[in-house]
Image (tube, coloured by chain):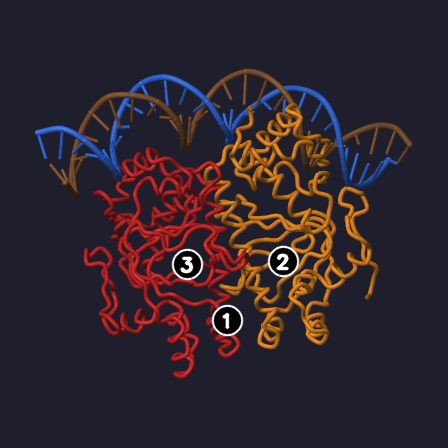
Chain colours: A orange, B red, C blue, D brown
DNA sequence: CGTCTGGTTGAACGTTATCAACTTTCGTGG
DNA sequence: CCACGAAAGTTGATAACGTTCAACCAGACG
């Protein structure tokens, strides 16, 4: 272990599990964590560790990789947050996702051997590098790992499709609710506080992701605050009425009663 | 071979390769076709064939599977076309994709073990069933197959992300152009005519997929016809100015000059 | 021949984008 | 530590794009 495990100290995302659990979950990144429930042997774990041990720091605003870079490695976010975005022909960008600790970057690059998007750090971050060729070699030795990997890719497809649904037929309030609920539940799944979150992305980026403008996001936030759904100060968000937010996100209830 | 290979007889999608090539490409479905360039041994091919041999007919309007069905099999489209769609909480549907011969259905179900969407036949169709557990067993024996499978899943992610881009920041003309260009190039990649296509889906379904209404699609078609980009009669489309269509789709040129 | 489904066209409306002015926050160097 | 300038966010007025509502048309089918 070359250095202590640090988490954002601002208190917004206090892990809600113990330090031991934390160490187990994060010491060797996502893939390892994901394989724990599957029950790898100690020996297999060691092999896996060897593949995913390399760490890399990425400063805020730096690119982890860019569109058309050759695909060699996957990355697991250890600390920090990223955004991935495609650059359109006319220079515009479309954000395709935000990644938090424990999530994998680069799965979309396997098919073509080139990265399909840029990945930019939203804050000072740290990733595990996973040499894809080495990972592939492990697949034949550890079937449980392979299965887990397929689940991971499939999950990415599912995630993208739910964004398609969001962009394709939700109104702005519904989109924004869905965005918050999604973030919240992803934090919850990773043991972080789920009702009190610090947005790592700016209004502009939220808007871009949701197919809306920065002004619309601003107005939505104001609206949600006034309705007593949220407490917001800058990028600090506290969700006050999660049930209602879920209802709006699911479409079972419109914003105005 | 339990029955003769039939293709849609309407002539809209005449394969442009020879009958022999056709037989090679389609006799045993997509996965086999995809593995040909990788160079599987004859023995491996046989094993693969054993897994994907089962055929199933699906009549127009029938569901191949529905949301929450347990995931057991993948499907490769042999003949016909499908649409996949998610049903929202309030009963609306959002189409997540259209699948043509040679494309795979069900990849999104791996992560949860349940299908995430309905798959409905747009016309009388035929699929190969691929028992997923058997396919998994083959992966350990045939690394080339595994690699191909990962490429396939990754491609699906890429595809979904480009739809996100479409829905997130394209104007209606650009969306529709992108839709046509996409269809066209997918047909081309599979050896079908690419400038003369028969739409297998209705206006409503196109609109749903593109995040627009049926009326908007209707108006777009009229507009594109008048501009000399397309010739359209019912669901028969002839692309007259592919370069311009591509330009509009890519955003490098707006619709009106 | 009437009905039904799918598609087209027109007019009015509404949501969200755009444009513009302004305020707040933040980072940096004095 | 403060002050400044730049970046990010807010708010209002106006406009545009696509939706909605409605009427109408064409082909398919009993």
**Alpha carbon distance from label 1 to label 3:** 16 Å
**What's the mark number on residue A104?**
2
Count of numbered tags: 3
**Number of the front mark, 2 or 1:** 1
Which residue in the structure is indicated by mark 1? B136
**Number of the front mark, 3 or 2:** 3
The reply, left or right, for residue B34 in relation to residue A29 is left
Which of these two is toward me, B139 or A242?
A: A242
- At label 1, counting other C-alpha atoms closer than 10 Å, the crowd grade (few under 14, some 14-19, many 20 or more) is some
Which of these two is toward me, A123 or B234?
A: B234
Vertical relation: A237 (above or below) A161: above
Q: Residue B233: horizontal and vertical position, in percent?
A: 21, 43
Q: Quarter holding the C terminus of chain B?
A: top left
Q: Secondary structure at mark 3?
A: strand
* Residue depicted at x 82% and y 55%: A19
* Residue depicted at x 46% and y 71%: B135
Which residue in the structure is indicated by mark 3? B105
Q: Quarter holding the N terminus of chain B?
A: bottom left
**Alpha carbon distance from label 3 to label 2:** 24 Å
Both marks 1 and 3 on one chain = yes
Chain identifier of the residue bearing label 1 in the image: B
The reply, left or right, for residue C23 in relation to residue B2 is right
Q: Secondary structure at mark 1?
A: helix
Question: In terms of sequence position, does the residue under pointer 1 or pointer 3 come before the other?
Answer: 3
**Alpha carbon distance from label 2 to label 1:** 22 Å
The reply, left or right, for residue B149 in relation to residue A54 is left
Q: Quadrant of residue A21?
A: bottom right
Q: Residue A78: horizontal and vertical position, in percent?
A: 72, 57
């Amino acid at each position: 272990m070359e250095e202590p495990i640090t988490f954002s100290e601002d208190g917004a995302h206090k892990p809600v599990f113990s330090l031991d659990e934390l160490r187990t979950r994060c010491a060797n990144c996502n893939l390892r964590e994901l394989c724990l429930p599957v029950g790898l042997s100690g020996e297999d774990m060691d092999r896996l560790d060897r593949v995913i041990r390399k760490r890399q720091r990425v400063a805020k605003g730096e690119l982890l990789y860019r569109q058309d870079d050759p695909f060699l490695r996957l990355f697991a976010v250890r600390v920090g947050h990223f955004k991935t975005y495609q650059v359109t022909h006319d220079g515009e960008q479309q954000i395709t996702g935000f990644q938090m600790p424990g999530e994998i970057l680069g799965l979309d690059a396997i098919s073509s051997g080139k990265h399909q998007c840029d990945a930019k750090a939203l804050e000072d971050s740290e990733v595990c590098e996973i040499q894809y060729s080495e990972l592939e070699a492990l697949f034949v030795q550890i079937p449980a790992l392979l299965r887990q990997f397929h689940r991971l890719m499939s999950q990415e497809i599912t995630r993208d499709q739910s964004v398609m649904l969001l962009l394709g037929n939700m109104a702005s309030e519904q989109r924004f609710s869905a965005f918050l609920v999604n973030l919240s539940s992803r934090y919850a799944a990773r043991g972080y506080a789920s009702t009190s979150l610090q947005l790592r992305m700016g209004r502009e980026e939220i808007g871009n992701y949701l197919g809306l403008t920065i002004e619309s996001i601003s107005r939505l936030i104001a609206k949600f605050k006034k309705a007593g759904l949220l407490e917001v100060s800058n990028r600090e968000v506290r969700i006050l009425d999660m049930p209602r937010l879920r209802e709006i996100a699911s479409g079972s209830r419109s914003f105005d009663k």
